[in-house]
C-alpha cells in the first residue's frame, strides 16, 4: 500500500490542515442511558438500520431538517448524518448547541 507524504510549508497551512483533521475526527456523545435508533432518513417513519448502545459517540458529517423529536436534549427537528444513509435525532446527541454544528446536508 503506497502512502503520500504531505509537505506543509508555512504555519497557516499547518493550522488549516490540523483544523480539518480535528473536524473530521470530532465525535459527540449520545445522551447517557439511552440506546439510540439510527434511521435511514431524517424521521421516525424511516427504517431503523441499527441501534447504538448507550455511551456511544458519533461523528456528524452534516445535518438536515426533518421530523421534530423530543429527547434528553430538548425538542429538535435537526437530524445528524453519522454515516452514508444513517441519521440520528439531534435531540439525543450532546452537541452543546440547539442549532446546527455541522454543514447542512445537500
Image (spheres, helix red, strand yellow):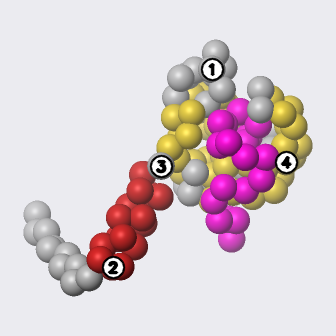
- Foreground pick, 70 / 22: 22
Tell me the quadrant of the picture where the C terminus can be found.
Answer: bottom right
Mark 4 residue crowding within 10 angstroms, few (<14) / some (14–19) / many (20+) = some
* Residue 88 visible from this viewpoint: no
Q: Earlier in the sequence, mark 2 or mark 3?
A: 2
The quadrant of the image that shows the N terminus is: bottom left
Residue that numbered label 2 is attached to? 13
Task: Tell us which disc is closer to us: 1 or 4.
Answer: 1
Residue holding disc 4: 77
| Mark 3, other Cα within 10 Å: few <14 / some 14–19 / many ≥20 | few
Locate residue 34, reporting x and y percent: 66, 20
Q: Secondary structure at mark 1?
A: loop
* Residue pictured at 65% horizontal, 65% vertical: 103
Q: Are marks 1 and 4 in contact (CB under 8 Å)?
A: no
- In this view, 81 is above or below 88: below
Q: Residue at x 38, y 61 (%)?
A: 21
Measured Cα–Cα span from mark 1 to mark 3: 18 Å
The residue singled out by tag 1 in the image is 32
Q: Do labels 4 and 3 touch, CB within 8 Å? A: no
Q: Which residues are magenta?
A: 88-106
In space, the residues marked 1 and 4 are separated at their CA atoms by 20 Å
Q: Earlier in the sequence, mark 1 or mark 4?
A: 1
Q: Which of marks 3 and 4 precedes in the sequence?
A: 3
Mark 2: secondary structure: helix
From the image, state whether disc 4 or disc 2 is nearer to you: 2
Residue 26 - label: 3
- Residue closer to the observer: 92 or 94: 94
* Residue 25: x %, y % from top left: 42, 51
Residue 105 falls in image quadrant? bottom right
Q: Is residue 91 one of those drawn in magenta?
A: yes
* Secondary structure type for disc 4: strand
Give how far apart the Cα atoms at labels 2 and 3 are. Answer: 20 Å
Amino acid at each position: 500500500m503506497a502512502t503520500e507524504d504531505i509537505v506543509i510549508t508555512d504555519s497557516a497551512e499547518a493550522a488549516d490542515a490540523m483544523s480539518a483533521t480535528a473536524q473530521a475526527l470530532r465525535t459527540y456523545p449520545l445522551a447517557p442511558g439511552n440506546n439510540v435508533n439510527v434511521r435511514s432518513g431524517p424521521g421516525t417513519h424511516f427504517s431503523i438500520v441499527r441501534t447504538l448502545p448507550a455511551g456511544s459517540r458519533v461523528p456528524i458529517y452534516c445535518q438536515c431538517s426533518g421530523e421534530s423529536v423530543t429527547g434528553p436534549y430538548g425538542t429538535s427537528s435537526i437530524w445528524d448524518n453519522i454515516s452514508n444513509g444513517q441519521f440520528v435525532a439531534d435531540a439525543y446527541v450532546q452537541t452543546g448547541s440547539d442549532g446546527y454544528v455541522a454543514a447542512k446536508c445537500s
